[in-house]
């Protein structure tokens, strides 16, 4: 069985937002990811494979988007699971529909999109192309730990839960302005997978996959995340995306 997961870039204010659509091949699990400059795409892919940036086979990390072609990374222990690093649509010279064909969107079961600026026309067109293909996708806001740490370093007195909710509402607001109805936003840190919304994101992925693919995908989750693989999947408390 193959599992394909794709990660794409859609800009969103207030830092890095990850949009994800997971695509599962009937024979082997593969995952693909595409993220903008400094959005944490490679770190996210490495975290999902339970690797650090200096481990053998890890996706290269850095502050500049260097991905120009789709690059697949196999899971080190779960055979058939691949994470695909896709160049952001703003990095390529293709229009949305051309980008979808070039990156072979049909091969993926769902997508993860990461962004850190405001939505553009191309981003909206890309989202509609994904929807047209009948694919599922999820919005994830990465590096929320950096946001909180930055406030602390500035000596700003803040309430953690209130600040996280502010970040979430800001991202939701901008997604709605881009034409997305009732969007969900998952706040995560690739360095702290047992915190924030990652456990909820994991359950949501599992709920949306067929049983066989779900079992394989959940087996691939890093040991640093919570929620045992064997646990019964509960419905996600967050609504799924609707673009229209």
Image (cartoon, rainbow, N blue to C red):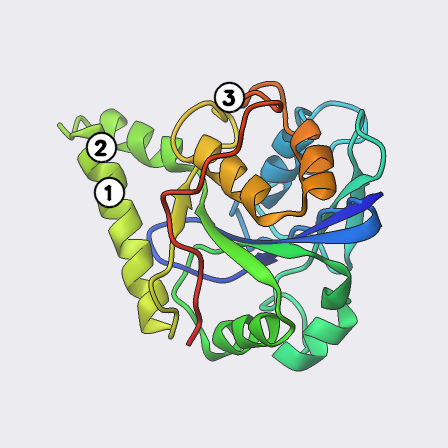
Camera-nearest residue between 31 and 142: 31
In the image, is 199 to the left or to the right of 20?
left
Residue sitting nearer the eye, 214 or 103:
214
Q: In which quarter of the image is the C terminus?
A: bottom left
Mark nearer the viewer, 3 or 2: 3
Residue 18, percent from left and from top: 50, 50
175 or 25, nearer to the observer: 25
Cα distance, mark 3 to mark 1? 22 Å
In the picture, the quarter occupied by the N terminus is: top right
Marks 3 and 2, the one that precedes in the sequence: 2
Look at mark 1 in the image and give the residue it sits on. Answer: 165
Q: In the rendered view, does 97 fall on the left or right side of 9?
A: right
Could you tell me if the residues under marks 1 and 2 are in contact, i.e. CB atoms within 8 Å?
yes
Residue at far left of view? 157
Task: Residue 148: name its quadrant.
Answer: top left
* Residue at the disc numbered 2: 161
Residue designated by label 3: 226
Identify the residue at horizontal 28%, vertical 46% (top origin).
Answer: 167
């Amino acid at each position: 069985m193959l599992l394909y997961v794709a990660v794409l870039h859609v800009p969103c204010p207030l830092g890095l937002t990850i949009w994800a659509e997971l695509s599962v091949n009937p024979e082997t699990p593969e995952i693909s990811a595409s993220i903008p400059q400094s959005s944490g795409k490679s770190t996210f892919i490495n975290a999902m494979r339970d690797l650090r940036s200096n481990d053998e086979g890890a996706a290269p990390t850095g502050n500049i988007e260097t991905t120009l072609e789709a690059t697949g990374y196999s899971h080190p222990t779960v055979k058939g699971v691949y994470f695909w690093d896709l160049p952001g649509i703003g990095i390529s010279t293709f229009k949305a529909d051309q980008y979808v064909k070039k990156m072979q969107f049909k091969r993926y079961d769902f997508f993860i999109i990461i962004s850190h600026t405001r939505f553009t026309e191309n981003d909206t067109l890309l989202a509609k192309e994904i929807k047209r293909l009948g694919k599922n996708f999820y919005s994830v806001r990465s590096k929320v730990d950096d946001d909180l740490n930055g406030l602390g370093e500035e000596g700003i007195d803040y309430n953690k839960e209130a600040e996280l909710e502010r970040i979430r509402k800001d991202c939701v607001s901008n997604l709605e302005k881009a034409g997305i109805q009732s969007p969900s936003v998952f706040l995560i840190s690739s360095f702290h997978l047992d915190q924030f919304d990652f456990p909820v994101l994991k359950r949501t992925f599992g709920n949306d996959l067929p049983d066989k693919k779900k079992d394989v995908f959940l087996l691939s989750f890093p040991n640093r995340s919570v929620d045992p693989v064997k646990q019964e999947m509960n419905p996600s408390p967050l609504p799924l995306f609707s673009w229209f």
